[in-house]
Amino acid sequence: MSHKTGFFSLNRRILLFGILLSGCLLLFFGMFSRGNHYLFEQQNRLLDVQQQYSAVVDGLNRADSHLYTYAQARSGETRAKCEKILQELDSASEGLSKLLEQPIFVDLEYLVDAYVEEAQKLLRAETIGAGQALILYQESVSSLKLITPLISQYSMAVANDRMEWQKKLERTQKNIETTMIFSAAAMLAVCIGFLLSFSRHITHNLVSLTKRAERICEGEWNVEMPDRPQSRDEVGVLTKAFYRMLEVIQDQIEQLKRQEAMERQLKEAELRAVNMKAKLEHEQLRTLQSRVNPHFLFNALNVIGGQAAEESAEKTLDMILKTADYLRYSLSNLDKTVTLSQELENVEDYFIIQKRRFGERMKFAVQCDEDCEKVKIPAMVLQPLCENALRHGVMPLTQGGEINVSAKRLQQRIFVTVQDNGLGFSEERLEEIRQRLKSEEYDDTQGIGLHNIVQRMNAFFHGEVECEIQSIPKRETCVILSFPAKEIIENANKEREDGDNDKSDFGG
């Protein structure tokens, strides 16, 4: 999984911050330079005003002195100096008027122009005599006298202008300094804010990653993850990659836990299967121990049957044959599977034997639907139910005892019912039996009981057997076994061969 930082990378952010900072510094120094340039220009203006005013005052004095000299001697050198001084005077008065832009200095410019014009008359009159030159000089002096009384007033105006501009310069300088200070403070605040935000953005995610990494190093994998970071820089990419890696690791840990739980359940199931097998083997061992040489027993029954036939005791002979069939079935099919019809035939043999014992006190009935006859089940699972109904249900009755066995098929399940009208069970005893059926630890291998039957059936049908017990005290008890319908397999040659061998032993 790849992440692109693009414009949001730390390198680009730092570069952008550098560009912005450089621009701010350039703006700051530009403002500082412009302010200084403005102050410098205003200082130059003050100097220019002072210089121009001094040039006007000095020019008037020098012009008057050189004109007087020229009026007496009228030399070419003096005339050239006078023209130069007059030009400088006219230029200075014009410049002063432009700098100050006050009416009084405009008047001064006009007065200086008039004085220069009168002085030019003297300089242009080259052929006049000394007397006439002095007259022209006096006319220029008359124009000069119009200016001289106003010199103090001009000086005062220049001084006032200088003071006003100095105050203005001071205010301007303070404003510039204040602006520079606030600009510098704003730039510093922006820089500090950016650096703090930048540092917090980086360190916050890194500190969070570090803390979680330390907890993981300590073996604590169940680390809660905060909301995903939205930044797209290198730190954001690193954080997302870390959280993604942590999710993958947690998923793998959960998968390992589920696998471990499944393995534990499998082992427990295997252990239960082993325990069930051990119980079944124990029961088979007890059954084997109880056979006491079945060949001898069959031979003895054969001798007794032969004697009964010689004596024409048909009932005795029939009783012996039924007993032999029952014993043969019980001893030869304990660890095998049989059809439901075979199991019910064995139940009928058992009922016939018990009928001879109890006579009219008991009635027995066995019913089986035709579509149930070839269903395959373990041997010796219904006879113990019938024996329980006889011993615990109807045997205490003096008369009227009934046991009914039926087998029906509903869809893909077989329902076998063993019902008696005996004493029944109390609610407490019935609940105790039901709880024992639900328990996997209960052991009734001391006899072939209901719990053992259900376990054998579950082992054969892979846990798909249901057992329901209904009882009304002093009235009836009904046990219902339901299980899947498994058709009998026709190639059970070994079972038939074993049955034929047993019959030959009896002499059939």
Image (cartoon, grey):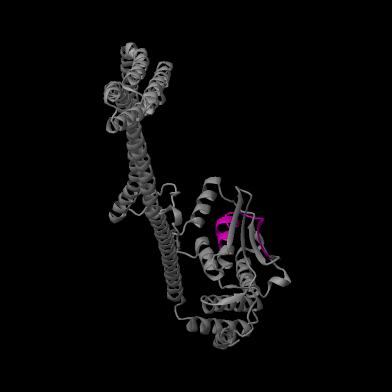
Give me the residue at 40% from left, 26% from top: 94
Q: Is residue 438 above or below residue 54?
A: below
Task: From the top left corner, tell me how far across and down residue 357 is, in percent.
Answer: 60, 66
Residue sitting nearer the eye, 201 or 98: 98
Report whether residue 197 is seen.
no
Between 140 and 107, the residue placed more toward the observer is 140
Q: Which residues are magenta?
A: 387-407
Q: In the image, is residue 396 part of the stretch drawn in magenta?
A: yes
Residue 80 lies, in percent from the top left, at 31, 33
Q: Is residue 137 left or right of residue 390?
A: left
Q: Quadrant of the N terminus?
A: bottom left
Q: Position of residue 39 (x, y in %)?
A: 33, 30
**x and y, in percent, of residue 16 in the image:** 40, 49
The mark total stands at 0
Would you say 261 lies left or right of 406 here? left
Residue drawn 52% across and 69% down? 459
Q: Residue at x 49, y 84 (%)?
A: 295
Compared to residue 252, the image places residue 332 above or below, namely below
Decide which of 241, 48 is in the foreground and name it. Answer: 48
